[in-house]
Image (cartoon, rainbow, N blue to C red):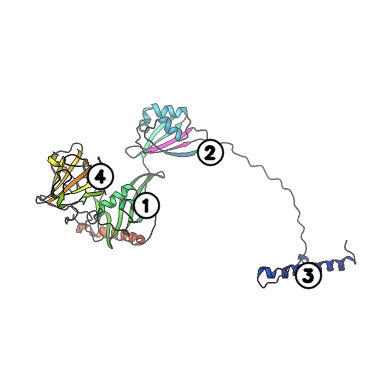
Amino acid sequence: MLTENTFPQGRKISEHKKKLRWFVALSALPLLGVVTAFGLVPQNDFDLATNKVDIENVALPEVPVDKTVADYWRDERVQRGDTVDELLRRLSVDDPAASEYLRKSADAASFRNLPVGTGVQAEITGSGELLSMRFLDNDDVQTTISKLGGGFRTATLPAQLETRLLVRTGEIKTNLYAATDAAGLPDAAASQLSDLFSGDIDFHHDLRKGDRFTVVYEMTYSNGALLHMGRIQAAEFVNQGQTYRALYFQKDAQQGDYFTPEGKSVHKAFLRSPIAYTRVSSSFSLSRFHPILKRWRSHKGTDFAAPTGTKVKVTADGIVAVVGRKGGYGNVIMVNHQGRYTTVYGHLSRFAKGLHRGQHVAQGEVIGYVGMTGLATGPHLHYEFRVNGQQRDPLRVALPDAKPVDSADLATFKPVEEELVSRLNLLRNTNLAQLD
């Protein structure tokens, strides 16, 4: 209880505290190195009423807890050497009835024949019981296996596929494939990129540090899982300051190809190289010391060093003229094109299955495999390009163009060209990794 004597005494104490606070604040100024003054004012000096807080315990209603474990989905891919039970184990399936059905039922035969790399999705309970499973078979048909009563049922339906457009940009520092790896471009897209511009760019000799590329390509998904890469839709390559562009144009359901924004075919009638990017071990030369014959002689072809078994592609549409063994060439294939051109593929380890003389082959088709038969010191491909029977440097000879966009299709081609070019223009100077 407050009396008359206590009020003045309380005021004296309050004034004493104020002075003490000012003293502490001012005495700290030299240490802080700033010119500042402040004071602390007791709350009661503002004549604010002191609030009283009452705390009351409130009983909350009990919330019922579902003690069952939720079902969930698991994703896995078929690995080499997998058994049914091993794949189920990785999917966290612990269900003897499911194992029995998948191992023995004729309806589950497609599951047992899935190729390596196929994605499998399984819905299971917390205790490992299989509720359902889905996957795409070899024909891209979606198969579902569902629990039904005390057993299982297999059903098929058209796959629900989703196509997304992705973008990668990169810069050459050492070579093409190092740059595409650094940019995260799939190997299949990197090979497509090389094929698209191989008629204009010699990827063995012409690349320079600082060259750039941009690629817009398709990826196909099913139920959110990646299935495979589709084709490149648009690509740009800047080589030594020169810009090359390729746009995919689908004329109709059956026909589609790559063209420049002006409507010219990106493809030459011939590919520059019959194998994927590799090292040139010996160039076209009129005078070269032969490593086996130990004498100087002309080398009227180009040697591409590559491991034995590397696929060899025919560089243009044509008719097989020779397939067999021929002197220093070893196992060799000769293909005639358009009446005046011939390509030669030597030192092969073997030929494509069923390849024979007189057979029509299409550009890019695999016709053989790298080896070291004949006069060869190591595995490589000897490639020749002949015009009217005369060998020419395949990396330097001017290659004929393929057919441009038909004049009747130009009106349809124009809006496609504008959309794809706008994408490339937007991304030209970015380091964008991905766009969905």
Q: Residue at x 77, y 58 (%)?
A: 52
Residue 182 numbered mark, or none: 1
Q: Which mark is in front, 3 or 2?
A: 3
* Mark 4–mark 3 distance (CA, rounded to whole Å): 91 Å
- Quadrant in the rendering for residue 23: bottom right
Residue beneath label 3, please? 19
- Work out whether residue 365 can be spotted: no
Q: Which mark is in front, 1 or 2?
A: 1
242 relative to 79 in the view: left or right:
left
* Mark 2–mark 4 distance (CA, rounded to whole Å): 54 Å
Q: Is the residue under label 4 in contact with that under label 2 (CB below 8 Å)? A: no
Q: Is residue 377 above or below residue 176?
A: above
Q: Residues within 10 Å of mark 4 (few under 14, many from 20)?
A: many
* Mark 1–mark 4 distance (CA, rounded to whole Å): 23 Å
Q: Is residue 104 above or below residue 6?
A: above
Q: Is the residue under label 2 in contact with that under label 3 (CB below 8 Å)? A: no
* Mark 1–mark 3 distance (CA, rounded to whole Å): 69 Å
x and y percentages locating residue 93 in the rendered image: 47, 33
- Quadrant in the rendering for residue 16: bottom right
x and y percentages locating residue 164 in the rendered image: 37, 50
Q: Residues within 10 Å of mark 2 (few under 14, many from 20)?
A: few
Residue beneath label 4, please? 306
Tell me the kind of residue under disc 2.
Answer: Ala
Mark nearer the N terminus (4 vs 3): 3
Q: Residue at x 18, y 47 (%)?
A: 383
23 relative to 213 in the view: left or right:
right
How many numbered circles does the render carry? 4
Which portion, as a residue range, is magenta? 114-140
Mark nearer the N terminus (3 vs 2): 3
Q: Secondary structure at mark 1?
A: helix
Tell me the kind of residue under disc 4.
Answer: Ala
Mark nearer the N terminus (2 vs 4): 2
